[in-house]
Image (cartoon, rainbow, N blue to C red):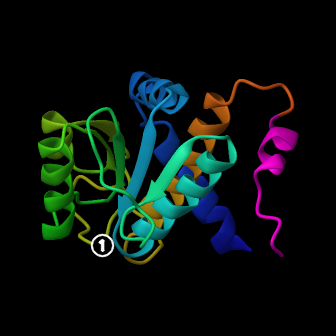
Amino acid sequence: MQTLKTILGELEDVSRTVYEEHYHKLVERLKEDRRFFFAGEGRSGLIAKTAAMRLMHSGKAVFAVGETTTPAIQEGDLLIIVSGSASSGNIVNLIESAQKNGAEVFLVTTNTIKLEQNNGLLINAATKHRKESEPDTIQPLGNQFDQFAHLLLDAAIIDSIEAKDANNKLKRLHSNLE
């Protein structure tokens, strides 16, 4: 139980470092009437897919990059990338492809340099790289970043839904092929 309490405390510390204006920018983007594409690699990619699923439940047109049913990205679309480093070859290619096709890119990352070049939200959390600027954590690899990204994206989606009865609204579009 102590490990869980420590992890929760670490996530609380990370939450204090999020710039509110960046968070609100994400919420406003999620309210827009446009197509949303989500991408990431590894665990961060899974977090991106969970956010894509939840946003789809709110009635938005949402796609996970790499799925066979994902259409071509185009002007007016928004690509949301979840990546601690935002610098792997695949992520860089996704950013360039989206921009070349007129789409907007929004990064959820720890990489301040990439944020200077793109819209996004900075998460000051530990990654597998354990840079000196990253906070201490008892967790391995990028757990801290991925966990916080998941919570942050869920919160932003909740804040983007303008319904008093959000649970029932989202439940209407929840999978019923179970």
Amino acid carrying label 1: it is Lys
Tell me the residue at 41%/62% (across/down). 70
Tell me the residue at 23%/60% (across/down). 85
Depicted 119 relative to depicted 130: above or below:
above
Please report the bounds of the magenta region as a residue range: 166-178
Location of mark 1 (residue): 128
- Is residue 81 part of the magenta span, yes or no? no
| Mark 1 residue crowding within 10 angstroms, few (<14) / some (14–19) / many (20+) | some
Residue 147 place in picture, x, y as percent: 53, 61
Residue 68 place in picture, x, y as percent: 42, 73
The answer to which of 98 and 90 lies nearer the viewer is 98
Locate residue 132 relative to residue 147 in the image: left or right.
left
The answer to which of 157 and 178 lies nearer the viewer is 178
Residue 124 place in picture, x, y as percent: 35, 47
Locate residue 100 relative to residue 148 in the image: left or right.
left
- Is residue 176 part of the magenta span, yes or no? yes
Quadrant of the rendered image containing residue 167: top right
Residue 170 place in picture, x, y as percent: 77, 45
Tell me the residue at 27%/42% (across/down). 74
**Residue 72 appearing in the image:** yes
Image quadrant in which the C terminus is located: bottom right
Depicted 92 relative to depicted 68: above or below:
above
Label 1 sits on a secondary structure element that is: loop
The answer to which of 100 and 71 lies nearer the viewer is 71
